[in-house]
Amino acid sequence: MSIVTVQLGQCGNQIGREVFNTICSDARGAHGLCSKKENESYHDTCKERFFFEEESEVPVARAVLVDMEPKVIGQTLSMAARSGCWKYDGHSHFCQKQGSGNNWANGYSVHGPRHKEAIMNLVQKEAEKCDRLSGFFTIMSMAGGTGSGLGAFVTQCLRDAFPTSFILNHVIWPYGTGEVIVQNYNSVLTLSHLYQSSDALLVHENDVIHKICAQLMNIKQISFRDVNQVIAHQLGSVFQPTYAGEGGLLYSRNPLGDLMETLVPHPEFKMLGLRNIPQMPENSLAYSTFTWPGLIKHLRQMLIANAKMEEGIDWQVRPPRLGSSIASGCSTNKPLHFNTSIANLVILRGKDVHSVDLEPIFTSILNTELKRKISWTASQLWNKLFPVTPSFDFFFFFKWSEIELS
């Protein structure tokens, strides 16, 4: 089934282009650890999900680009075309010349109603190109005016026009130090509206990604493109084809539906997060050796300690036992925060994934009594298997739907 991506604002369009770059380069790669038949199946499934082909046989992204300024859209279209691997449809974009001025209300109450028909016509045309539509994946920032305000408005329009299709909003949480003086207001307004229309919200924090670039990727002068590439790396690998279940040899047919079924056990708990290990510069992979038991050990503690990345995991954190106070599980120096997610999904990607033992993670999430108390949720881990590809040999961990359990 196919996913239509809606890229909103400068941030959404720049990240969207990096996502399609990542997906296309991986799908077109020579996967030496898989058979030729498996590679062809993977390529075909990936292409159906994210691209369609015209007479030129160059894959065309299933995407709609929206911005209130023409500069970023023009750059995005030209950079994709110059890659030679894929391109955007030249008629699937909408832009104006006035901008939104970082004003949420301007995007939501002015540009949204004024340009609703033109934008939704583009979305409708893109959806009609899909033989089987899984849903919509929107990419936006919460700090500006177009991504946040117009993004919230477009999401509501998508829900009205496609009531049975899944909608996953990917939102970029602004830097804590501040990018825009009104970013706090924009973020609150965006979240409040998206929560009513979206099926799930996948959040990336700029501060966390910036720290990954500095500490794990060893980038000295971090640019927005560096941050976008790390985000695209994670997003691309999430939405690439996965086997339907443990030991299965068939790819998941409904990618968004499977994610929602596993990770959104209740319509009120739809805030999603993402963790992955290991992360390092590509030129360091040749000098690094990983074993599944070692990765599982680190992943287990990341899950327990609610760590944002593998660097600096606090190994003192332990989940509290039933009946004990939270403070008893904390060190004397600083408060420790254990994982409170109610649904988790593990995706394995690499060699010999079918033989990996996930029992240490299963037994570490919650104690038996606490599991029974929230048995109405999908609190257990689900194991998804990626085929082996050389461009990504990573272990992905998703931490979803966080709430405080009392």
Image (tube, rainbow, N blue to C red):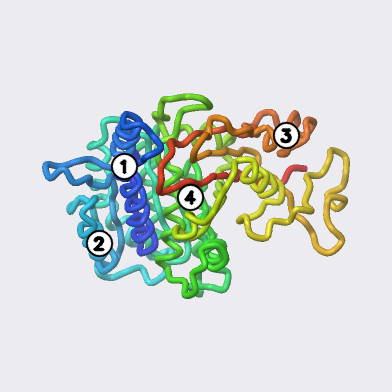
**Residue 148 in view of the camera:** no
30, 199: nearer the viewer: 30
Which quadrant, please, contains the C terminus? top right
Badge 4 or badge 1: first in the primary sequence = 1
Badge 3 or badge 1: first in the primary sequence = 1
Mark 3 is on which residue type? Thr
Badge 1 or badge 2: first in the primary sequence = 1
> Would you name the residue on which mark 4 appears?
194
Res 293 quadrant in image: top right
Circle 4 SS class: helix
**Neighbourhood count class around disc 2 (C-alpha, 10 Å): few under 14, some 14–19, many 20 upward:** some
Tell me the CA gap for discs 3 and 1.
36 Å
Marker disc for residue 50: 1
Question: For the residues carrying marks 4 and 2, which lies nearer the camera in this image?
Answer: 2
Q: Is residue 273 left or right of residue 312?
A: left
Tell me the CA gap for discs 3 and 4.
34 Å
Circle 1 SS class: helix
Res 370 quadrant in image: top right
Tell me the CA gap for discs 4 and 2.
30 Å
> Would you name the residue on which mark 2 appears?
79
**Neighbourhood count class around disc 4 (C-alpha, 10 Å): few under 14, some 14–19, many 20 upward:** many
**Neighbourhood count class around disc 1 (C-alpha, 10 Å): few under 14, some 14–19, many 20 upward:** many
Q: Is residue 329 above or below residue 245?
A: below
**Residue at (46% x, 36% y) in the render:** 386
> Would you name the residue on which mark 3 appears?
363
